Amino acid sequence: KQEVTQIPAALSVPEGENLVLNCSFTDSAIYNLQWFRQDPGKGLTSLLLIQSSQREQTSGRLNASLDKSSGRSTLYIAASQPGDSATYLCAVTRTGTASKLTFGTGTRLQVTL
Amino acid sequence: KAGVTQTPRYLIKTRGQQVTLSCSPISGHRSVSWYQQTPGQGLQFLFEYFSETQRNKGNFPGRFSGRQFSNSRSEMNVSTLELGDSALYLCASSYEGVETQYFGPGTRLLVL
């Protein structure tokens, strides 16, 4: 059974800092990995999707990497802003059931002024 | 394009009642998935529908059911509600189910 863990559970940083969020998964037979953000009481917003054959994806100030062999992904946020404050979730899909997302526990990020 | 829409946004029910939630996917998307989010269990997969057929199913009791219509809109039904069914129910859509999934704002269900 796939288990996805995110460390740390919560993080507070001052504005302008670069930061890294971690995601670990136990089963390396993944189809893809997706990073989302969730604002309080809202739905999920997709940030980046990495296919299992890829090593990284970039979008603006965000960069996500994937290392299947070690079962890890990182989300790098450059020059953090207060608007980045949210809960960040990673989710993996498995080959054969690629529509089923297995979510991590989330990292709650607060960027302070 | 309009995003994924879910109705209603909020619901209050009592134990033993049943409830139906609706999800309209992004135009052109044929896959609709449903998730339950609770503080204790996090986000858990309920089921996925593709072209009116249930393609994947999570580990939820049979009280949770769904269906998809020919226009790809989907409904989820929960019968004999329990207090533990209180949660945020999210639906997500994508073209084929294997690409980026786009989530709706959710329906917050409170069971009293």
Image (spheres, coloured by chain):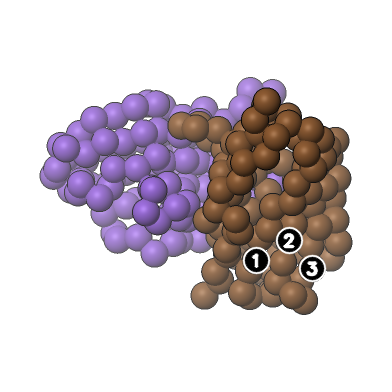
Chain colours: A brown, B purple
Q: Amino acid at mark 1?
A: Ser
Question: Depth check: B103 or A2 in front?
Answer: A2
Tell me which label, 3 or 1, sits earlier in the chain: 1
Q: Is residue B14 above or below residue A91?
A: above
Q: Badge 2 is on which residue?
A: A73
Q: Is residue B2 left or right of residue A105?
A: right
Residue type, mark 3 in image: Asp
Left or right of B111: which side holds A107? right
Query: Can you give x and y, in whole percent of width and height, for residue A88 in the image?
Result: 62, 45
Residue in view at x 52 percent, y 48 percent: B33
Residue at image position (61%, 46%) is A11
Task: Name the spot of residue A87 as percent of width and height, x first.
Answer: 57, 42
Where does label 3 land, which residue?
Answer: A67
Q: Residue at x 25, y 50 (%)?
A: B84
Q: In the rendered structure, are the residues bearing label 2 and label 1 in contact, judged by CB atoms less than 8 Å apart?
A: yes
Q: Is residue A59 visible?
A: yes
Q: Is residue B3 above or below residue B91?
A: above
Do marks 2 and 1 share a subunit?
Answer: yes
Asked if residue B1 lies left or right of residue B46, the reply is: right
Tag 3 and tag 2, C-beta contact below 8 Å: yes
Q: Quadrant of residue A31?
A: bottom right
- Identify the residue under disc 1: A24
